[in-house]
Image (tube, coloured by chain):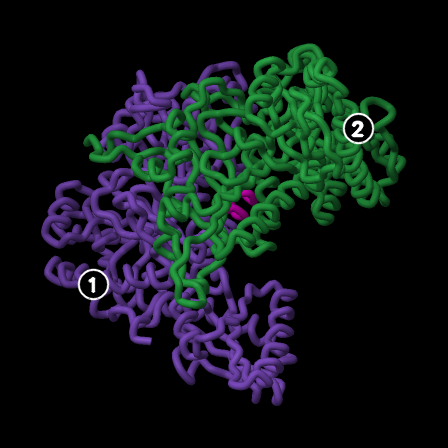
Chain colours: A purple, B green
Amino acid sequence: MSEYKLPSRSEDFSEWYNQLVLRAELADYAPVRGCMIVRPYGWALWENIQQALDRRFKATGHVNAAFPLLIPQSFLEKEQSHVEGFSPELAVVTVGGGKSLEEPLVVRPTSETIIGHAYAKWIKSYRDLPVLINQWNSVVRWELRTKLFLRTLEFFWQEGHTAHATYEEAEIETRQMLDIYTDFAVNEAAIPVIPGRKSESERFAGANETYSIEAMMGDGKALQAGTSHNLGQNFAKAFDIRYLDKTGELRYCWTTSWGLSTRFIGAIIMVHGDDKGLVLPPRLAPIQVVIVPIFKSDEEKATVMETARRVRAEFVAADIRVKIDERDGVTPGFKFNDWEMRGVPLRVEIGPKDVANGTVALARRDKPGKEGKSFVKQNSLIDAVNETLSSVQESLYQRALAFRNANTHDAQDYAQFKTVVEKGFALSYWCGKRECEAQIKEETKATTRCIPLEQIGEEGCCIRCGQPAKERIVFAKAY
Amino acid sequence: MSEYKLPSRSEDFSEWYNQLVLRAELADYAPVRGCMIVRPYGWALWENIQQALDRRFKATGHVNAAFPLLIPQSFLEKEQSHVEGFSPELAVVTVGGGKSLEEPLVVRPTSETIIGHAYAKWIKSYRDLPVLINQWNSVVRWELRTKLFLRTLEFFWQEGHTAHATYEEAEIETRQMLDIYTDFAVNEAAIPVIPGRKSESERFAGANETYSIEAMMGDGKALQAGTSHNLGQNFAKAFDIRYLDKTGELRYCWTTSWGLSTRFIGAIIMVHGDDKGLVLPPRLAPIQVVIVPIFKSDEEKATVMETARRVRAEFVAADIRVKIDERDGVTPGFKFNDWEMRGVPLRVEIGPKDVANGTVALARRDKPGKEGKSFVKQNSLIDAVNETLSSVQESLYQRALAFRNANTHDAQDYAQFKTVVEKGFALSYWCGKRECEAQIKEETKATTRCIPLEQIGEEGCCIRCGQPAKERIVFAKAY
């Protein structure tokens, strides 16, 4: 059993995280430095995230497509700030089919350029607009300091790319996608997030405006969990994406892009996990209920397994994602620990007494010991499980929200600010100047996360320089 | 309208295909030579193919995962015939983050090597077996002669990789996956296929045995539409994939791999398409029914659209994939052609008279003109459409099967053989010698496609050399 014990979350958050990812079999290190293998359990979680997002994308009129992995290097140079942002991070193919290539090809770090090239070809008139395309793929960025899910050379994501006739439509789209990410984080992943606007220095390379959702991890640090960019006409001008308007005039389009990645799995781990391992929100959990049969003799095994299989069939019929742990040679206690490590929201225990009494024991992953345990009649089990899954989903959200609220402060002065950002968010007025932002970063290691869309409507004084400030911004140390 | 006319399928099959892919907006050429953009309509078709396969994979115990895109070049060299097969086709990353890499990285052409490396790490005992993992991704092979969907530098596919304790289990898995591909082709894509064993010279680089499904295209040529490989212990030995058996002895695993790619979309086009464009099997069609409203005045438009929207809602409720073509400024005739080009199986026309009579006109894509048209009461429309969709699915299969049968011959002698393979399949005895296979290829351009699993149980004489032969094999020119 001792091999199952994780480092303590409160004592060594970073090592707790690394060990959890490996032991819950979410991901593994690849033979190439900084690359990751997403193992089946981690990928099943990602598939559920994909479905929850894809449903929302399609309901708002988006379609999926696939653009090539390889991009001519010259494409990246067409948009000035884009190339400055991405050129230090590129993986470059210089040899193909045994020969040196005339023009090197970049493994996509993001696809604004190659999609811009295609849109320029496809879009002719206002009738072709808007174009609302998303793609699910992986991208490569040559990161130096990597951590599984949070920052890897190759990561998996979706990238939406849209083109519109007007600035207003592009802005509405950018904000709509931010809303979708917020809704997904809150209602599927049980993670409270702050949707807001990035400062100029934190914007995506090539964007006029970047919006993000920011979440607080279990150590009080921030994680940017999704971004949505209003690209203005920057890429439209670089790639000549134009349309004939109703009057016959040729105009540049307005474009957007938005993405959410496997990084989000890191957020789920760091928001909900505990010393026993992963804790998954029921709506995204690959397995929502694990059934552990308990028996000693072969005779007990026969009756227990019969009930376990019947119960399993009822779960399947009720669209509850279920697994029976039928492994021989390991104890029920080992199985309990194993599924707790993997974060399965509910455990159903069935022993000979339960068979005799027509009951099962139901244990919640989010509440340890007796507090989370109840005994339920088999004939009302589906209702009980559905209710308990909803209750777990809601509790996880409320717990994360309470933690964030407890660690978010409106610092009264810069001294207090410095203390606050050591272990949480400071929601403070900022004058908007790059110098203040840079000084704060140097002095505290906290960066501006986002200017929350929701403001209290009052003006204040910059936490660093004391000059008048119109809005509050979230400062925090960040992943 | 003339711009919609395709080259004649019978006169110029190749150009008909190229034009159809572009005009039905399935795919487009990318700025990098030989690469492809899969456009939203093509990708929606691929998503339906993915779902139909993924359902079958999961029902047989497989799980999905994601292995890295970049593979150390040295990995490919560990299995001798694998490196010989793939090294001429590699795309190589030599620069990362602005620096030359110490070891070049290959963009995966297939993932046996990197997955073998992971399996060696994960598999310890017989309890860990079998490992049944699939991944959906894209791979890159530096092809010189390319054609959209059929052969591109980057293509999209699934690749399954499994590890087993015994040869027998690996062989059962290999054959099971071939059966799944066959079932998918026949029952989802309405494409008759011949499942069989590849000759030694046509095997996958590194396999002990390769099985494939072979389909006949509309020009009589063959297309390999899916493959399943029994890799023996070749990769297990190259990557040291071993397990402790029940007696405590260390043994090498037996592995398999199997894949089906976006090439299959090429098969759907070339089997079912006609001079008017694409013809999609209803089970895979992104849009199963298109509703075209017909009206002249605004008053007519109001009543027609009301009925169209009500009918649309009924289709949605019945899980039928439907679209109303509401475009202004184009005629109903233009819309008919447009959706015929895109291969939508059924068209529902609603005009003012239909509204008055409580009817609609229902037109089948697979039967032109009056033959495929009927008038249906609105109150029994869902049943009529469901029946007609089933009928279209079945007709497409029967038509393709009849075509294949008419163009498959058991040649009596080599002279007849030469004529037969000009425009179809020759099902002939072959002695099994590489020389005969090579001579036939040189003399007729026909290659061995597969030795059908179904044999008539008699022996014969090799079509080329006249020596005794145990089995018949399919010879054909191939894509």
Q: Is residue A59 magenta?
A: yes
Estimate how packed mark 1 is, as few (under 14), some (14 to 19) or many (20 or more) residues with alpha carbons within 10 Å.
some
| Main secondary structure type of the part rendered in magenta | helix
Nearer to us in this view, B303 or B469: B469
Magenta part of the chain: A53-60
- Quick one: SS at disc 1? loop
Identify the residue under disc 2. B402
Nearer to us in this view, A466 or A387: A387
- Chain identity of mark 2: B
| Amino acid type, callout 1 | Lys
| Amino acid type, callout 2 | Ala
Q: Position of residue B418 (x, y in %)?
A: 69, 15
Residue A177 bears which disc, if any?
A: none
Identify the residue under disc 1. A423
- Chain identity of mark 1: A
Q: Position of residue A183 (x, y in %)?
A: 46, 54
Q: Is residue A70 visible?
A: yes
Q: Position of residue A230 (x, y in %)?
A: 37, 35
Total number of numbered labels?
2
> Which residue: 16% across, 53% down?
A463
Q: Position of residue B290 (x, y in %)?
A: 71, 33
Q: Is residue A456 magenta?
A: no
- Quick one: SS at disc 2? helix
Estimate how packed mark 2 is, as few (under 14), some (14 to 19) or many (20 or more) residues with alpha carbons within 10 Å.
few
